Amino acid sequence: MTDVKSKRLLGGPAFLTADRLHSAAIHLLRRLRVRDRESGVGPAQLSALSVLVLGGGPRSLGELAEAEQVRPPTMSRIVAGLVRAGLVRRGKTEDGRRVRLEATAKGTKILQEGRRRRVESLARAVSVLSDKEQQRLGELIDLLQQVIRNL
Amino acid sequence: MTDVKSKRLLGGPAFLTADRLHSAAIHLLRRLRVRDRESGVGPAQLSALSVLVLGGGPRSLGELAEAEQVRPPTMSRIVAGLVRAGLVRRGKTEDGRRVRLEATAKGTKILQEGRRRRVESLARAVSVLSDKEQQRLGELIDLLQQVIRNL
DNA sequence: GCAGAATTGTTAGCATAGCTAACTAAATTG
DNA sequence: CAATTTAGTTAGCTATGCTAACAATTCTGC
């Protein structure tokens, strides 16, 4: 039994850490989902909008779909909802097939308000921690981002 | 301007940390969702099933709904799907209004396999980190759990 | 003990979000 | 310039969320 790779993974420390992390992420988002609903914009729309507002400028639909890890038809409908709500504007590009998607002023405002609300609850929970713990938490997130890149 | 509490929260370090954490959690779960699909069981069903399997025994529908932060009609349909798939069994209780929901052997097996698959990818990503980093990650997840309790 | 209130769950109907398959339109290539 | 490739949309399925309205059961007050 020298199957170290798979065997160690299953019951090993990395597996246990992964399991706890997975569970924590689920519970975290489940709580924050409640605040999400106040914006009147669905979570997928809000997330796509955030790419346009915070991700540095306009994107094509395909780029948005990839950023959101979603298939083009799914993103097509998400964008349709955002356009219908007046949060995103479609524009033309040199390439007639591609669409240029850009947040409107209203979209930017709604996103920032929604983002503030969502993160507010979490920030309150974070600010209960001591300064030192908050700093350590910040470091955790660096590690977390590294893990996500490896995913 | 001595409104330290709310003003500091908005642009302050806790807010930034919360924002990064929120974003990281979203992206983490978005990646893992891909593995989830292999089980053929939807995410809400899988999550509800996990409460029955890992949460220590049978529950009523209302208890399940509360545990999953979902309204009773939603849980009613999730459970209907689980029963249809043979993963959960309904039983009677002394109180004729309540239902006793219990995972079947098949449900337990499916959940554990699904859980293994989901966490496997994450564990692989975690195991790329050095031993020291992994240890720190584990410690910092404790912090994360603390934050979630404060939510 | 029985009428009315409260509790538990389901059904119906609506919206969002995910997918694949099949289509249209535009650009690229041979 | 015909064939292929690329970008997006449309159609149709499933799953998940909600509220409103309903049914069944239990509890309460008299």
Image (cartoon, coloured by chain):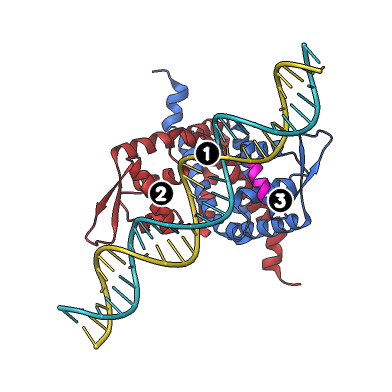
Chain colours: A blue, B red, C cyan, D yellow
> To which residue does mark 3 refer?
A83
Q: Nearer the viewer, mark 1 or mark 2?
A: 2
As helix, strand or loop, the secondary structure at mark 1 comes to: helix
Residue A80 within the magenta-colored segment of the rendering: yes
Which residues make up the magenta segment?
Answer: A75-81
**Which chain hosts label 1?**
B
Q: Amino acid at mark 2?
A: Ile
Q: Distance between the Cα atoms at labels 2 and 3?
A: 32 Å
Q: Residue at x 51, y 53 (%)?
A: A30
Q: Which mark is residue B33?
A: 1
Q: Residue at x 36, y 44 (%)?
A: B82
**In the image shown, does B119 or A87 lie closer to the viewer?**
A87
Residue A3 appears in view: yes
- Based on the displayed image, in which of its 4 quarters is residue A65 positioned? top right
Side of B56 where D17 appears, left or right:
right
Q: Residue at x 34, y 43 (%)?
A: B84
Rendered-image quadrant of the C terminus of chain A? top right
Q: Looking at the picture, do discs 2 and 3 lie on one chain?
A: no
> To which residue does mark 2 refer?
B78
Q: Residue at x 52, y 41 (%)?
A: B138
Side of B2 where A12 appears, left or right:
left
